């Protein structure tokens, strides 16, 4: 049973979704299993945006699937299946969480770079100096590194650990965008973000992961 | 942006790179970005680092469903199937 | 219309990596593109844009179809490389770099007190080539006399290139 591909063109993805929907409604267990597997990482990342612990997040994901099954007959297809499932997930997280759940904390969303620069300011020439804002010393040239280093197990572990350490909102966005291959629109709709906010979060998340990779590769 | 609208600094470039990848920079801003990475080796390497980072993140496999969860979900599915 | 284009030594675009079929004798084949601001289209340069984009190899490119003028480049829906500007090779590139470096020193020393911190960047930058030195010289000019002189310095660079490369201004 092929996994639902996350990186297909939208028309191919839509066709595949329609097929899965039909099979779900026909009580095809294998289709359900495949869908659950395919969405799991994304749903977990989104849930962790709203609830404290991973265990609670897993419970939320589970409850969301029950909600999906209950609402399946009423799904009209106005949004994509994935977006609809993720909406149920978000609502489940908010409902279930009570005091635990919180909306995505965007009240302190300063413009990119102000309070969370992609690179520490000390690495650039200070304001008022000649060529202020330019690198003091260039960052590394990774294209000169052996490929095995960049593609290996260790690098992947560093990346995973870095993602795990991200603030929840950043982790959700980078997981949905760069791991699950969701579009910017899907992320904005699911997490109720503006396009601008989504980009800021993605930018910060990627910058953190780059920094972690840099520390690892510079060793 | 710096006071001058005719060039960007390295410090600005590292904040613009995500928008650049997404095609979210306006035409003039994208030009300044590209002119800069054309002459600035350091920023060229930085942008390459970000590309490599995105590619590395893309290789993180989606999480597997824990077996107990799969069992519970299948049970829920069969239950739902029964009641239909 | 005739315009210019810098490519890497291997004939690929430095930003998109697009591989152009290089002309030898006759112009290369036409390449078509949808114009989408910042996303796609054939990028090409007017003479005045050359210093901003200095690269490894320089080509004459013929543009056709829709041509949009932006602040520092042209975007076209159709283009083909016509010929390489052979004059833009190592010796001339180095001469241009040196010219910009000398201008940087001249400008930095033209004020009292001299701009030593700005001048200090010049020689270490020379190994990085014409694009960087063009920027450094223009930037020093701007530091002394404001944004207009950034462009004035770029215009000087264009005039030098046009003359040395035998291109019509």
Image: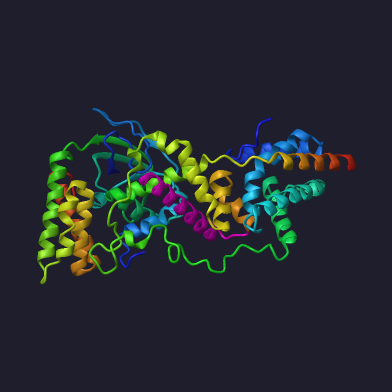
Residue A168 location in percent, x, y?
58, 57
As drawn, A22 above or below A75: above
Q: Quadrant of residue C143?
A: bottom left
Q: Is residue A217 magenta?
A: yes
Q: Which residues are magenta?
A: A192-219
Q: Is residue C65 left or right of residue A195?
A: left
Q: Is residue B15 magenta?
A: no
Q: Is residue C66 visible?
A: no
Tell me which residue sits at (73%, 37%) in the image.
A33
Decide which of C162, C6 is in the foreground and name it: C6
Q: Quadrant of the N terminus of chain A?
A: top right
Q: Is residue A218 left or right of residue C98?
A: right
Visual colour scheme: rainbow
**Residue lying at the far bottom of the rendered structure:** C112
Q: Is residue C135 left or right of residue B81?
A: left
As drawn, C6 above or below A108: above
In this rendering, the count of numbered labels is 0
By secondary structure, the bulk of the magenta-drawn segment is best described as: helix
Residue C160 location in percent, x, y?
14, 50
As drawn, A68 above or below A18: below
Decide which of A22, A103 is in the foreground and name it: A103
Q: Quadrant of the C terminus of chain A?
A: top left
Residue C134 location in percent, x, y?
20, 53
Q: Is residue A198 visible?
A: yes
**Residue lying at the far right of the rendered structure:** B83
Tell me which residue sits at (28%, 62%) in the image.
A125
Decide which of C51, B64 is in the foreground and name it: B64
Decide which of A70, C27 is in the foreground and name it: A70
**Residue lying at the far front of the rendered structure:** A219
Residue A97 location in percent, x, y?
72, 61
């Amino acid at each position: 049973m092929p996994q639902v591909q996350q990186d297909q063109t939208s028309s191919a993805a839509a066709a595949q979704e329609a097929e899965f929907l039909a099979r779900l409604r026909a009580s095809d267990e294998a289709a359900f299993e495949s869908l659950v597997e395919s969405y799991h990482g994304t749903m977990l990342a989104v849930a962790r945006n709203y609830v404290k612990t991973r265990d609670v997040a897993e419970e939320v994901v589970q409850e969301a699937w029950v909600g999906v099954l209950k609402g399946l007959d009423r799904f009209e297809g106005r949004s994509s299946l994935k977006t609809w499932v993720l909406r149920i997930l978000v609502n489940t997280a908010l409902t279930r969480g009570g005091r635990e759940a919180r909306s995505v904390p965007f009240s302190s969303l300063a413009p990119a770079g102000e309070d969370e620069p992609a690179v520490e300011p000390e690495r650039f020439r200070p304001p008022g100096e000649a060529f202020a804002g330019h690198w003091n010393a260039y960052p590394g040239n990774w294209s000169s590194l052996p490929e095995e280093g960049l593609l290996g197990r260790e690098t992947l572990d560093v990346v995973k650990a870095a993602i795990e350490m991200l603030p929840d909102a950043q982790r959700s966005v980078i997981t949905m965008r760069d791991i699950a291959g969701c579009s910017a629109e899907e992320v904005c709709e699911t997490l109720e973000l503006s396009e601008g906010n989504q980009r800021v979060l993605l930018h910060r998340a990627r910058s953190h992961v780059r920094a972690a990779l840099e520390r690892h590769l510079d060793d | 942006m710096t006071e001058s609208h005719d060039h960007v600094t390295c410090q600005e470039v590292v904040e613009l790179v995500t928008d650049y990848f997404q095609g979210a920079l306006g035409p003039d801003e994208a030009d300044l970005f590209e002119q800069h990475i054309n002459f600035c080796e350091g920023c060229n390497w930085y942008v390459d680092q970000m590309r490599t980072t995105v590619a590395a993140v893309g290789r993180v496999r989606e999480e597997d469903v824990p077996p107990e969860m799969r069992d519970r979900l299948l049970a829920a599915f069969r239950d739902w199937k029964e009641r239909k | 219309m005739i315009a210019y284009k810098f490519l890497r030594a291997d004939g690929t675009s430095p930003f998109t990596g697009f591989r152009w079929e290089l002309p030898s004798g006759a112009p290369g084949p036409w390449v078509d593109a949808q114009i989408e601001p910042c996303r796609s289209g054939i990028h090409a340069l007017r003479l005045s844009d050359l210093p901003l984009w200095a690269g490894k190899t320089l080509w004459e490119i013929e543009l056709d179809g829709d041509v949009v003028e932006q602040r520092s480049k042209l975007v076209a829906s159709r283009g083909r490389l016509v010929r390489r500007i052979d004059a833009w090779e190592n010796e001339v590139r180095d001469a241009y770099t040196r010219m910009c470096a000398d201008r940087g020193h001249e400008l930095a020393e033209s004020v009292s007190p001299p701009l030593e911190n700005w001048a200090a960047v010049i020689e270490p930058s020379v190994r990085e080539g014409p694009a960087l030195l063009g920027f450094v010289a223009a930037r020093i000019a701007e530091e002394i006399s404001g944004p207009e002189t950034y462009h004035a310095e770029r215009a000087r660079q264009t005039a030098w290139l046009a003359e040395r490369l035998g291109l019509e201004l």
